[in-house]
Image (cartoon, helix red, strand yellow):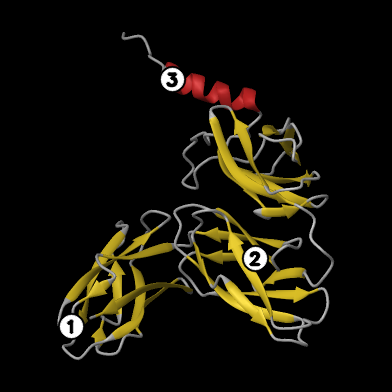
Amino acid sequence: MRAPTFSLRATLAVAVLVLAGAAPAYAASGTRTACQQQLTSFSASAQRVPSGATLTGQVTIACRAGRSGVAITLAGDSPALTVPASVLVAYGSRTTSFTMTAGQVVTSVPVTVTASYGLDSLSAVVTVVPPSPAGVAVRALTLSATTVVGGGDPITATVELTTEAPADTVVYFYGSAYGPVSMTPTVTIPAGQRTGSMQARAEQVSSDYTYSLSAEVRGTTPAGAYLLITPGPFAVSLSSTTIARGGSATATVTLNGGPVASDAVVALSTTVAGASVPASVTIPAGATSATFRIWTSVTSSGTGRLEAVYAGVPKYVYFATY
């Protein structure tokens, strides 16, 4: 009889997860597949912070922490920003936050803050700026939704000033570097008003992404908010986002959760004048994707979007004709 063999690599991988305190996660299908613990995101609530002010950092890991939690090592490369040596992701959680404090500076000092776990490390740059003179500032930044599906409906970001604007006041918005969000970089609040809003659109993502958004009046303490972007049940892509008049492009819809037991019907429409798409596309049972064509007429022009809806969730992809 042939002796049973075991995978040393798999055994070591599970052992590392147990020693690290990670709680094993299993696939929905019932297959006992250990979740591979890793550091997935790290962000700061602001990219600029005045001397003496505080800001919040947030880290996210791939798997829920085990009973002993998961320790994340933290470090800053300048004393201009005080950063804790480590932070603990508590049992059963995937994310945690911590506070950083800006020291006194006379000129702007960029500080790289690094979060590390095992072989994984992620960094964010925070610039400490000299204290600003008293005046109007952003008191609060609120979002119309704190969790959105990437590629779906836009969100509204609203800022409130500490006082009525003494004159037309420009508020600047900025977010996580290279983050999957498109937004208006500024909004002007008219004299005598205290609030203003802008629209932001989260792009499609392949896994959960925590986006840090900040708003400030130049030279004052920024206000921040976090937006969790999720993949949703499906994704939509185009072979080209520019289509010649009288031409076509291929669109693909893909299920993010793998194949389903029955046909998945995705409703389709477009806002581009002269462009046409089928009313729906069907992903057959057992499959994960399907394709269809977008056709444009010789009179088509302008920019608009392809709209797809599955399981009550909308996704939009923007394209132009020329």
Q: Is residue 37 visible?
A: no
- Describe the element under mark 1 as helix, strand or loop: loop
Indicate which disc, 2 or 1, sits on the residue closer to the N terminus: 2
Read off the residue under disc 2. 146
The percent position of residue 55, horizontal first and vertical second, equals 75, 51
The percent position of residue 37, horizontal first and vertical second, equals 56, 34
Indicate which disc, 3 or 1, sits on the residue closer to the N terminus: 3
- Describe the element under mark 2 as helix, strand or loop: loop
Q: Quadrant of residue 221?
A: bottom right
Along the viewing direction, whichever of 85 and 272 lies nearer the viewer: 85
Q: Taking 259 as reference, is 51 left or right? A: right
Q: Taking 210 as reference, is 5 left or right? A: left
Q: Quadrant of residue 45?
A: bottom right
Q: Is residue 34 visible?
A: yes
Q: Amino acid at mark 1?
A: Arg
Along the viewing direction, whichever of 91 and 192 lies nearer the viewer: 192
Q: Amino acid at mark 2?
A: Thr
Q: Amino acid at mark 3?
A: Arg
Using the image, determine if residue 95 lies above or below residue 32.
below
Between marks 3 and 1, how big is the CA–CA gap? 55 Å
Along the viewing direction, whichever of 40 and 66 lies nearer the viewer: 40
Read off the residue under disc 3. 9
